Amino acid sequence: MTLSQALSFAILGAMMLLFIWGRLRYDLVAMLALLASIIAGTVKPEEAFRGFSDDIVIIVGSALVVSATVARSGIIETALNWLSRALTSVRWQLTALVGTVTFLSALVKNIGALAMLMPAAFKMSKRSGVSPSLFLMPMAFGSLLGGLITLVGTSPNIIVSRVREEMTGEPFTMFDYAPVGLGLSVVGMLFLQVGYRLLPADRHATPSLDEAVGISDYNTEAEVPPEAKAAGWTVGQLLSSVDGGLVVTGVVRNDVRRTVTMPETVIESGDTLLLRGEADALERAVTAGGLRLARQEEEKGASKDKVGILETVITPASLLVARSAADVGLHQRHGVNIIAISRAGQRMTERLSATRLAAGDVLLLQGPAAILPERMQDLGLLPLAERSIRLGNVQKELLPLIILAAAMLLTALSLVPVAIAFFGAAVLMMATGAISPRDAYEAVEWPILVMLGALIPVSEALQTTGGTDLISNWLSAAATGLPAWGALALIMVAAMAVTPFLNNAATVLVMAPIAAIFATELGFRPDAFLMAVAVGAGCDFLTPIGHQCNTLVMGPGGYRFGDYARLGAPLSLLVVLVSVPLILTVWGV
């Protein structure tokens, strides 16, 4: 072993220990590893930051923006809500949720697909009277399996494709992963349909912010513009379009309020509807009916990304106490609007502008983002803990899906590279207003991109120093006498074992070159072994820390660390047993 190899292994080992220790953020660990590699001389200074210009960084960042835009469109959740009305048993509700998140994870980043469907899981669990924990972990596992179907489903696939291009000159294409990924997804879904019973029955979700601070339904007003779909509908049709959770408390027509609204009351153009419900139910009503929230008086020339919404609570010392928005001249004097009000334990009947406010009321305050914090202080309001409130910021539904479909078609036909297609899709979604630039930047997980950019030269240093050759020699010695399927299973299990301690992307950056050289030394083609690394790194079902999808559901599901292995261990074994013959059949050796 040479000095440069020893230094590369020492840096890699220290990096793994810091990942396991968990006290430092993974992006900081990656930057420390890069800095150590530069000091040790295993990475040349002129090549230190080359990783940040790699296509991987562009693809992952663009895919996160695309995922967030599709999630904001609400069309998937609306379709699932419609489907859930016909599903009464927990097993079939679980099947619908897992199947949907698995399918979506093939189109967008799996973490984005899971995040957009978690609200639907909470609604179904509430409707069925069961804990969300029965749905959330199977959904997380389904999203991991779905991410194996296409190139952009998960980061390991993108990295493995890059390694193959470096070795053979040909990257994996968009749907090269599909035969193995689809097979594993089908088998995994069948297992999860019955395997969810392995989860403890006493796990309960952590209280939501609504439950913690007692936020009741919001009251708001929505105008019916001439082009609205709801013009001509009955009140009953509007309520059915949002699957419950909404009440029409009144209709204002020609400045005259009708306090009694029957289901057969016809909605006319120019009406103002007085609505009460949860924020997401109100949002669905605005979207489904083509309504416009009243008092959204944006400044002329203000772009959408400069208008924000804050969820605030009125303090006893606030100048709004015992006064209405009209009394204070909220928009005229302060440049902000109240678009919804929530008051615990009391039904509100007045219009927003005439409602006399009280200490403890929760307001959705809208206005130019630059002045909202200052106005909040001036008015004596306090911000609530941050959570996602999209009421008043609903975006176009179909446009993101059309752009995504076009990007995937262009890559599938090999007309443009993946990085260009998804970068273009992200830019078009911002340019067309499907997502604002601010929300797009917030959707990007910058620590992941920093980690990728920093670790690419570190992993390349392991190759240039001959470290990967050394490890592959050790693996070759261990695999002596093993048949092809045994060597393939060895690589896959090794990737599965390393992933909980490293990030899954970091695992592939380290393991993929080793697997390719290992295959070559055994006289096999590298394709099957690279695919095994992608599957192994993408299927961490044993811990909540190996993949973001597992981490995302831990708190909301009330899971403990050991709960993951109860459902994940048999699923991991099933993945190995099914994927090894699938990979050998599709890719050969």
Image (spheres, helix red, strand yellow):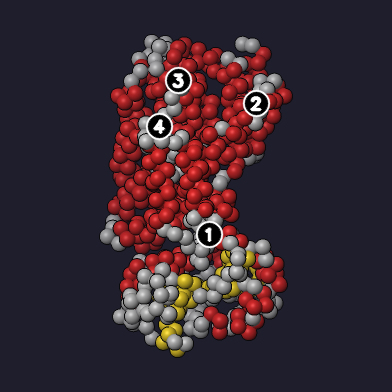
Alpha-carbon neighbours of circle 4 within 10 Å: few (<14), some, or many (≥20)? some
Which sits earlier in the primary sequence, circle 4 or circle 1?
Answer: 4
Image quadrant containing the N terminus: top right
Identify the residue under disc 4.
173
Counting other residues with Cα less than 10 Å from the Cα at mark 2, is it few (<14), some (14-19), or many (20 or more)? few
Amino acid at circle 3: Thr
Mark 3 or mark 1, which is nearer to you? Answer: 3
Q: On the picture, is 209 further left or further right than 134?
A: right
Q: Quadrant of residue 355?
A: bottom right
Q: Is residue 236 visible?
A: yes
Distance from Cα at disc 2 to Cα at disc 1? 40 Å
Disc number for residue 69: none
Where residue 174 appears, x then y in whole percent? 40, 35
Q: Amino acid at mark 2?
A: Glu
Q: Nearer the viewer, residue 535 or 70?
A: 70
Marks 4 and 3: CB-CB under 8 Å?
no
| Residue 466: % across, % down | 58, 15
Name the residue located 51 percent from the left edge and 42 percent from the top edge: 423
Q: Which residue is mark 1?
A: 388
For marks 2 and 4 on the same chain, the one whose residue lies earlier in the sequence: 2
Q: CA distance from mark 4 to mark 1?
A: 35 Å
In primary-sequence order, the first of circles 4 and 3 is 3
Q: Residue at x 42, y 55 (%)?
A: 399
Where is residue 147 shown, x and y percent of the image? 41, 39
Q: Amino acid at mark 4?
A: Thr
The circle on residue 168 is: 3
SS of the residue at dot 3? helix
Q: Amino acid at mark 1?
A: Ser
Placement of the C terminus among the 4 image quadrants: top left
Sequence-first disc among 2 and 1: 2
Q: Residue at x 40, y 39 (%)?
A: 410
Residue 183 location, quadrant: top left
